Amino acid sequence: MVTQLAHISLGFVDTVMVGRLGPESLAGVALGNTIFFNALIFCMGMLMAVGPLVSQAFGANNDDAIGRSVRQGLWLAGLLGLVAFLIIYNGETILRWLGQSEANVLNAGGYLRAIAWGIFPFLGMVALRSFAEAVSRPRAVTAIVLSGVLVNIALNWILMFGKLGFPKMGLVGTGWASTGVYTFNFLLLAGWVLKQSDFARYHIFSRLSRPDPHTFKELFRIGWPIGASMGIEMSLFMLTVVMMGWIGTTELAAHQVAIQCAAFTFMVPLGIGMASSVRVGQAIGKRQPLGVWRAGMTGVGLSASFMAVTAILFLTFPRQIVALYLDLSEPANQEVISMAVQLLFFAAIFQVVDGVQVAFMGALRGMKDTYRPMILSVFSYWGVGLVSGYLLAFKAGLNEKGLWLGLVLGLACAAVLLTVRFTKLSRASRT
């Protein structure tokens, strides 16, 4: 959970610091992050298959399978990184195709060309992190990512505002700072893995040059539905950003503030879901069906409880939360502030269902059940969330409120369907 909060803190820090550059830069980073994370999310989801493969092998005390899974994960990270780099580096063209204003496109384009170079170390970090957590050694990852937050603040300050002799790069400096942080995190984690004497038996780096088609195929089989599910969910948010851009720059800036708040709180249930995946996988490896049920339900209970608290905070202190991103006393910000406060109301509504769906999704991944949840995601996020959001915003005339109502409906649908799926599978494993 702390690792996920540290990860999202990078985006939080970027948004807060970019907010000091003005609404135009805030809109630019919103569009830039939409392209970056949508290209990243499928790759990251595929690499998360390393987790259930390693956790089940760890539960079964199969050291050879652990090493093979991590090595093929690193190979997959390199191949996926190349594809993602090409997409992100040319993100400016994609944004023009999506009908965004030229000013916003130019702001986002420079940011994307800088952050694109961080894709390779980021994906390498995902593969190694999945391994470390699956063998119940998450604390080093947490420490490394937390230190990366401090590095990110320092690099943003230096590159965005032109400190210590560097030129003032504005939004582009934010992109280069992110690339620097991702590289810093990966190198530290790789060094830590190399130093652990008890990891030597896995031969992660010493046999890295040896291909293993069978394990690579298994990694791909489990991973692509995870990546697709995460991509489908992210595409709901991406297309919401795109449609928000059709409405106006003010709406886009307000949306960036509200969605960043929701994304920050989401990191806690996401971390719990990852922990559930590991514990479920280890229970399966040890052939403990009751442990599978307990791990999944405990994760959901924790996630729903936390998100209920954040929903109350969003409803009670909306202006104080928005003040983290924008100067409340600045006259030019008043329209954005008022709209962001309204959108936080909708964010509060979907907090609990968002926590439930991500926790059950994590538990199902620990069972290597990835294909059917992907189908459920398509129906929930596209069939319900995206379609209803578009109709409510542009046909019913609710504009930005309609788009957020679509998010609420899509996430609620996913929560219900994934609850049914986990209950069915875990009950079957106990009979």
Image (cartoon, rainbow, N blue to C red):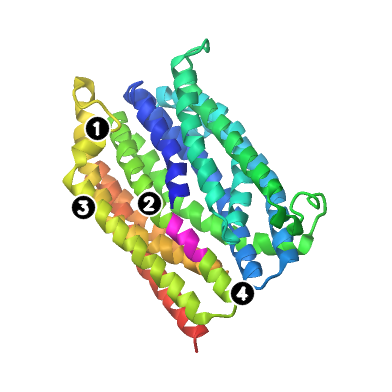
- Above or below 18: residue 262: below
Mark toward the start of the polypeptide (1 vs 3): 3
In the rendered image, the residue lying farthest to the bottom is 431
Mark 3 surroundings within 10 Å by alpha-carbon count, few (fewer than 14), some (14 through 19), many (20 or more): some
Q: Position of residue 172 (x, y in %)?
A: 50, 22
Q: Which mark is residue 273?
A: none
Tag 4 residue:
285
Q: Where are the magenta residues, as a range?
A: 271-277
Tag 2 residue:
266
Q: Residue at x 20, y 41 (%)?
A: 318
Mark toward the start of the polypeptide (3 vs 4): 4
Query: For residue 380, what is the image quadrant?
Result: bottom left
Q: Is residue 375 visible?
A: no
**Callouts 2 and 1 close, C-beta under 8 Å:** no
Secondary element type, mark 4: helix
384 relative position to 285: left or right = left
Tag 1 residue:
323
Which kind of residue does numbered mark 1 sit on?
Answer: Ala
147 relative position to 208: left or right = left
Nearest to the observer: residue 325 or residue 344 = 325
Which kind of residue does numbered mark 4 sit on?
Answer: Gly
